[in-house]
Image (cartoon, rainbow, N blue to C red):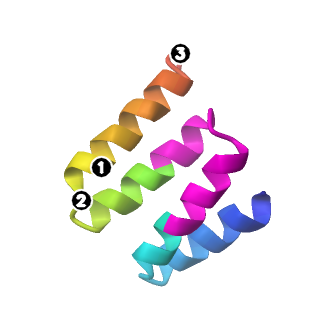
Amino acid sequence: MSDLVERASAAREAGRLAEAADLYRQALKAQPRSAALHNNLGGVLDQMGRPVEAVSAYRRAVEAAPEQ
Protein backbone atom coordinates (compact mmCIF):
# COMPACT_ATOMS: atom_id res chain seq x y z
CA MET A 1 0.00 0.00 0.00
CA SER A 2 2.75 2.48 0.87
CA ASP A 3 4.27 1.90 -2.58
CA LEU A 4 1.05 3.21 -4.15
CA VAL A 5 1.11 6.28 -1.93
CA GLU A 6 4.77 6.97 -2.70
CA ARG A 7 4.10 6.62 -6.42
CA ALA A 8 1.04 8.88 -6.14
CA SER A 9 3.03 11.54 -4.31
CA ALA A 10 5.83 11.36 -6.87
CA ALA A 11 3.35 11.62 -9.74
CA ARG A 12 1.72 14.64 -8.10
CA GLU A 13 5.06 16.37 -7.58
CA ALA A 14 5.95 15.70 -11.23
CA GLY A 15 2.68 17.22 -12.38
CA ARG A 16 1.18 13.93 -13.52
CA LEU A 17 -2.08 14.65 -11.76
CA ALA A 18 -4.34 12.12 -13.50
CA GLU A 19 -1.86 9.37 -12.65
CA ALA A 20 -1.67 10.58 -9.04
CA ALA A 21 -5.47 10.57 -8.73
CA ASP A 22 -5.65 7.03 -10.10
CA LEU A 23 -2.98 5.82 -7.68
CA TYR A 24 -4.69 7.46 -4.69
CA ARG A 25 -7.95 5.79 -5.73
CA GLN A 26 -6.18 2.43 -5.88
CA ALA A 27 -4.74 3.00 -2.41
CA LEU A 28 -8.20 3.91 -1.12
CA LYS A 29 -9.50 0.51 -2.24
CA ALA A 30 -7.17 -1.01 0.38
CA GLN A 31 -7.84 1.66 3.02
CA PRO A 32 -11.23 3.25 2.34
CA ARG A 33 -11.36 4.96 5.75
CA SER A 34 -8.00 6.73 5.39
CA ALA A 35 -8.56 10.43 5.96
CA ALA A 36 -5.07 11.22 4.65
CA LEU A 37 -5.67 9.43 1.36
CA HIS A 38 -9.03 11.12 0.82
CA ASN A 39 -7.41 14.46 1.62
CA ASN A 40 -4.56 13.84 -0.82
CA LEU A 41 -7.01 12.81 -3.52
CA GLY A 42 -8.98 15.98 -2.88
CA GLY A 43 -5.87 18.06 -3.30
CA VAL A 44 -5.02 16.44 -6.61
CA LEU A 45 -8.58 16.83 -7.89
CA ASP A 46 -8.49 20.49 -6.88
CA GLN A 47 -5.23 20.96 -8.78
CA MET A 48 -6.89 19.32 -11.79
CA GLY A 49 -9.67 21.91 -11.73
CA ARG A 50 -12.31 19.46 -10.52
CA PRO A 51 -13.65 21.28 -7.45
CA VAL A 52 -16.89 19.29 -7.05
CA GLU A 53 -14.99 16.00 -6.89
CA ALA A 54 -12.37 17.59 -4.64
CA VAL A 55 -15.01 18.71 -2.15
CA SER A 56 -16.45 15.19 -2.10
CA ALA A 57 -13.01 13.75 -1.33
CA TYR A 58 -12.46 16.34 1.43
CA ARG A 59 -15.85 15.48 2.94
CA ARG A 60 -14.92 11.79 3.00
CA ALA A 61 -11.68 12.75 4.75
CA VAL A 62 -13.61 14.60 7.46
CA GLU A 63 -16.07 11.71 7.82
CA ALA A 64 -13.17 9.27 8.19
CA ALA A 65 -11.50 11.31 10.95
CA PRO A 66 -13.88 13.94 12.32
CA GLU A 67 -11.72 14.54 15.40
CA GLN A 68 -8.79 15.79 13.33
Of labels 1 and 3, earlier in sequence is 1
Gap in angstroms between the C-alphas marked 1 and 3 = 23 Å
Of labels 2 and 3, earlier in sequence is 2
| Residue 57: quarter of image | top left
Residue 14, percent from left and from top: 48, 84
Which quadrant, please, contains the N terminus?
Answer: bottom right
Q: Residues within 10 Å of mark 3 (few under 14, many from 20)?
A: few
Residue at 49 percent of width and 52 percent of height: 40
Instruction: Indicate whether 33 appears above or below 9.
Output: above
Magenta stretch bounds:
22-39
Identity, as a three-letter code, of the amino acid under mark 3? Glu
Disc 1 target residue: 53
Identity, as a three-letter code, of the amino acid under mark 1? Glu
Magenta residue check for 28: yes
Residue 1 falls left or right of residue 61: right
Q: Mark number for residue 50?
A: 2
Residue at 59 percent of width and 66 percent of height: 23
- Kindly report which numbered mark, 1 or 3, lies closer to the viewer in this rendering: 1
Magenta residue check for 38: yes
Secondary structure of the residue carrying numbered label 2: loop
User: Viewer-proximal residue, 67 or 2?
Assistant: 2
Residue 9, percent from left and from top: 58, 68
Gap in angstroms between the C-alphas marked 2 and 3 = 26 Å
Q: Residues within 10 Å of mark 1 (few under 14, many from 20)?
A: some
Residue 13, percent from left and from top: 49, 76
Q: Mark number for residue 21?
A: none
Residue at 21 percent of width and 64 percent of height: 49
Identity, as a three-letter code, of the amino acid under mark 2? Arg
Disc 3 target residue: 67
Report if the CB atoms under discs 2 and 1 are less than 8 Å apart: yes
Q: Residues within 10 Å of mark 2 (few under 14, many from 20)?
A: few
